[in-house]
Image (tube, rainbow, N blue to C red):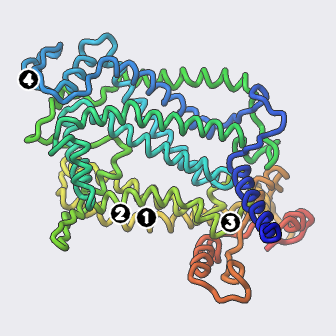
Amino acid sequence: MGNESRPDAPRQGRHTGRVAAWAEARLGTRGPAGTTVMRRIFPDRWAFMLGQIVLHSFLILVVTGIYLSLHFHPSSEGKVYRGGYAPMRGQSVSDAFDSTMHISFDVRGGLLIRQAHHWAALIFVAAMFALVMRVFFTGAFRKPRRLLWVIGLLLLILGMLGGLTGYDLPDDLLSGTGLAVVNGTLLSLPVIGTRLSDFLFGGEFPGHEVVAHFNLLHVVVIPILMAALILACVAWSSRQGQNRQVGAGRSRRKLVALPLRAHAVKSVGFFFLVAGVVFLLAAIAQINPIWEYGPYRVDQVSTGSQPDWYMGVADGLLRAMPGWEVTAWGHTLALDNLVPLAATGALFLALGAYPFVEAWVTDDDSEHHLPDRPRNRPVRTALGAAWLALYAVAFLGAANDLIATHFSLSVDAVTWAVRIGLFAAPAVVFALAKRVALGLQKRDRDKVLHGRETGVVKRLPHGGYVEVHEPLSPRQVRLLTDHEQYLPLTPGRVGSADGPDTRTQRLRAGLSRRLYGPGTQILKPTVPEPEDIAAGGHGP
């Protein structure tokens, strides 16, 4: 028996070693030797500021949310309003609506805190969205930061869900209209839709438990998950180190940054700056005035109602979808709700899966600490621009009724324009962004090979005229050429040289050609080429 067990030991060791290597590469389990908290350094650049806005706005959300929860009553029980807003006295309202009005008109500073909470939520999602886009376009999601990419995307989605559950709590006419849309979307889910709607609303819509359920999600579940993700992100970043930046004194192994004390002082000052902007907006810019909408009634719908901007893509897809239904085996599928829900999920799923697809088709498992310039990845930049174009068209579709009334257009015409734009805009933007990136790459190559245009025209002895070019400095040349260029994979490189090509191998090779094949990038100059130009030679 001892002889039979010997071959398994190395195999088990190999598996254990692979798991340890995976954890070390992505989680930094060992950490820098001898590094203490006080010796850690932090980058000092604009991109790092986006993460700080996310953190500071989350802190403002927590503080203002605790204050609001002391006065808010998450109940749908009816009562007569007798508060400080005279035009609504004597009306039948829910306890949630009454407590929100009490916060707005009777609690000292309540309206300011309530509006600051709402503005902080909008800023949080906006900063998180900008951060995710920056990470995508610069390729900062590559190894060893793929796990950080997943955390960031989950944090963005949780922020959107937190905002959705938050603005539905006051039980006013606007939030009730949004809840009707949520209920219709839930009912469109096959098999579980009806049961999920009954559980969430406590019976047939509008039910009597939705405010309590949403309050639990908004106050407890989502904040705890967001705090856990933020702590994981901070811990992971301090363990692995931040992304480097191309420039003077910077390299793949060298980071120009601030020590902890200097960073802490700047971070505290930046927190007060973000808080000042939030409370300034809360003081001068009214948002969500529920006293203008009134309490929710099932027989009324708020006209011209739009959700917060981050939910505009879902609402726009919902408005653009025709009212199609499919009946099969005695059951009806409401495609007008199910398809937009699936499309919204697919939109974010595609964004989250792209880094792993890119790593698969490039066969690149090395670590990257320098961000890409978007122009040096034309196809990735074009795909990101097309994603944003689709998002923007769907966002505009959420305001089809307002666009129609403000510009004296037909709602059907605006809706059809949105439907066409959902397919045409991404294709046009993809082609345009790719051409712009290739053009910028070609300009960089010409600058490296021929130098910078000086604007000085020189007359030659034979009478011709040429413009004088000034050679770039070594630092500028490095900035324009210090990036990797992948070669497309072939089925032979993907799989076995002797075995037949499988369908997966052909798919991988095809995607690789789409990303880095002919016509997808301009070859950067090799090292001898700039030297030949400086010596009087001629580059291609």
Q: Is residue 465 visible?
A: no
Callout 2: few (<14), some (14-19), or many (20+) C-alpha neighbours within 10 Å? many
Q: Earlier in the sequence, mark 3 or mark 2?
A: 2
Task: Give the labeled residue for mark 3.
Answer: 442
Q: Which residue is mark 2?
A: 422
Camera-nearest residue between 479 and 22: 22
Residue count near mark 3 (Cα–Cα under 10 Å), binned few <14, some 14–19, many ≥20: some
Cβ–Cβ below 8 Å for labels 3 and 4?
no
* 189 relative to 310 in the view: left or right: left
The mark nearer the N terminus, 3 or 1, is 1
Residue at the limit of the structure toward the front, as seen here = 1
Query: Given contact means CB atoms under 8 Å apart, are the residues at marks 2 and 1 in contact?
Result: yes
Residue behind mark 1: 426
Side (left or right) of 184 relative to 146: left
Find numbered disc 2 in the image and state the secondary structure of the residue it sits on: helix
CB within 8 Å, label 3 to label 1? no
Residue 540: x percent and y percent?
A: 79, 74
Amino acid tagged 1: Pro
Task: Tell which of 226 and 404 is nearer to you.
Answer: 226
Whole-number angstrom distance, CA of label 4 to CA of label 2: 44 Å
Expressed as whole percent of the image width and height from the top left, the position of residue 23 reads: 70, 51
Callout 3 touching callout 2 (CB < 8 Å)? no
What secondary structure is found at the residue carrying circle 3? helix
Looking at the rendered image, the disc whose residue lies closer to the viewer, 3 or 4, is 4
Q: Secondary structure at mark 4?
A: loop
Residue carrying label 4: 91
Q: CB of mark 4 within 8 Å of CB of mark 1?
A: no
Residue 443 % position (x, y)? 68, 62
Q: Earlier in the sequence, mark 4 or mark 2?
A: 4
